[in-house]
Amino acid sequence: MYFTKMQTIRGHVYTLKPSSEQEALLAQTAGVVRLIYNLAREQRRTWGRRPYAGGAHRNLGAMSMSGELSALRASEPWIKAVSQTAQIQALIDLDRAYANFFEGRAGYPRARQKWRDDSFRQAGREITVRRLNAKWSEVRIPKIGWVRYRDTRPLPAKKDGAADIRNATISRRSGGGWQISIAVRYEIEERPIPAGAVGVDRGVAVPFALSTGEMVHLPKAMRSRQAAQRRAQKVLSRRKRGSARYAKARARLSALKARDARARAHVAHVLSWRLVKDFGLIAIENLKIANMTRSARGTIEEPGSNVAQKAGLNRSILNVGWYAFERMLSYKLEETGGVLSKVPAAYTSQTCAACGHVDARSRESQALFACTACGVTTNADINAAKNILARALARDEDRRGNTPLLDVEASTLAACEASTRFRSKGLNAALA
């Protein structure tokens, strides 16, 4: 079976290397764009429900407010010095935020904050990219000029050799410095759909366990950096807020966290790309991660219990990045034509993959599963991954009238167990 051609839009992220003057212009642009967003939000919050004289309500959408923005730019040179397109994009972002709020997809739009929301977006027609050599390229940003970046992944080009850039988002990185995300529309070539299937169990002690028998761990260096993060957090708590020493301590803590975030994203990208290339069906548990990581603090009237233990568990779950991995699988499977199947998570860790017997006592420890019925002993996470895959295959057969998806029979579960194509690649060794 072949996956037909389709068009998609993907973001390519690069680390910018601006000069000191360009870095000041980037910060100035982000600050003005943040101000425009907050002013427009306050205007909508204050006047959104108040009618004009005569009973007509004001239109506070992006297009109508662009006229007021032009008047503001004419009266304030420091606002005019910043790209007008970036400021209009902030108004469009506010429109989208209010639409998400009224349609129940998000909360009420909050005000943007310095350091947390230092970003702006430019339209694709204003972004130009040119290659300098084999490793470096540069991008032209309006009002800022040509900024160099390390070209780690060339932009996909059209037949004429030019990339179809839709927009570009420039943002301050949490660990310091600036980065650019260039959204490019391109065509995915026709390719065969992989015929295999795999189940993935996400955990804390073992971040990713596969039904093939492989277990993927985060880099060991992340564990040592956690102690450094705790020390940096303690130093930050002793500094006076707003002082130079407080800013230095905060930058130190942000750099440590950003390094872990990059390592975590690298593991997820490498694993997800390997899976979508080798398997047409990937099964995971349908986890409600937001509910699972909710605080147990409770209220004054009804305080929670085991708050510290639950907070530690929440940190461990978020440190693995379950949702980020799921999101990567989702959009990468679109490119390969595969399917992401989410199955119910109930009893996957208590069910024996060999005989189907369900018993909580079979889970002797975090790592060991010993079935009380048939006596099979195996790794608990691998056993759960096999159950996840079996549920996905069974559900697909029921939905299609015993015609398995991508010609994958339930009997191939044994073949997936014996597969060594994952173990031979040595992902854990490469990441250690």
Image: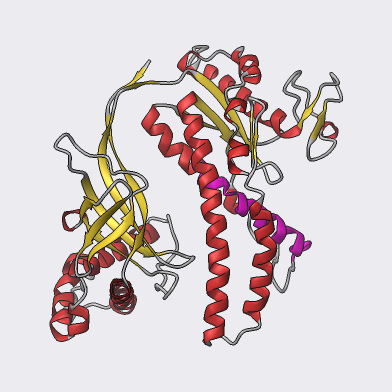
424 is higher (above) or lower (below) than 101: above
- Residue at left 17%, top 84%? 77
Image height of 306 relative to 299, above or below:
above
Q: 193 above or below 335?
A: above
Q: In the visual, does 279 lie left or right of 416?
A: left
Q: How is the image coloured?
A: secondary structure
Quarter of the image containing the C terminus?
top right
Magenta portion: prevailing SS class: helix
Residue 9, quarter of picture:
top left
* Residue 154: in magenta span: no
Q: Tell me the magenta residue range.
A: 304-325
Q: How many marks?
A: 0
Residue sitting nearer the eye, 181 or 176 = 176
Q: Quadrant of residue 108?
A: bottom left
Q: Position of residue 23 (x, y in %)?
A: 33, 72
Percent coordinates x, y for residue 173 in the rendering = 43, 64
Quadrant assignment for the N terminus:
top left
- The image quadrant that residue 52 belongs to is bottom left
Say above or below: 429 vs 311: above
Q: Position of residue 143 (x, y in %)?
A: 19, 70
**Residue at the spot x=56%, y=84% of the render?**
245
* Residue 340 appears in view: no
Residue at 62% of width from left, 17% of height from top?
413
| Side (left or right) of 301 relative to 109 | right
Q: Is residue 315 magenta?
A: yes
- At which x and y percent is residue 91? 26, 67
Query: Is residue 330 toward the left or the right of residue 233 in the image?
Result: left
One can see residue 327 in this view: yes
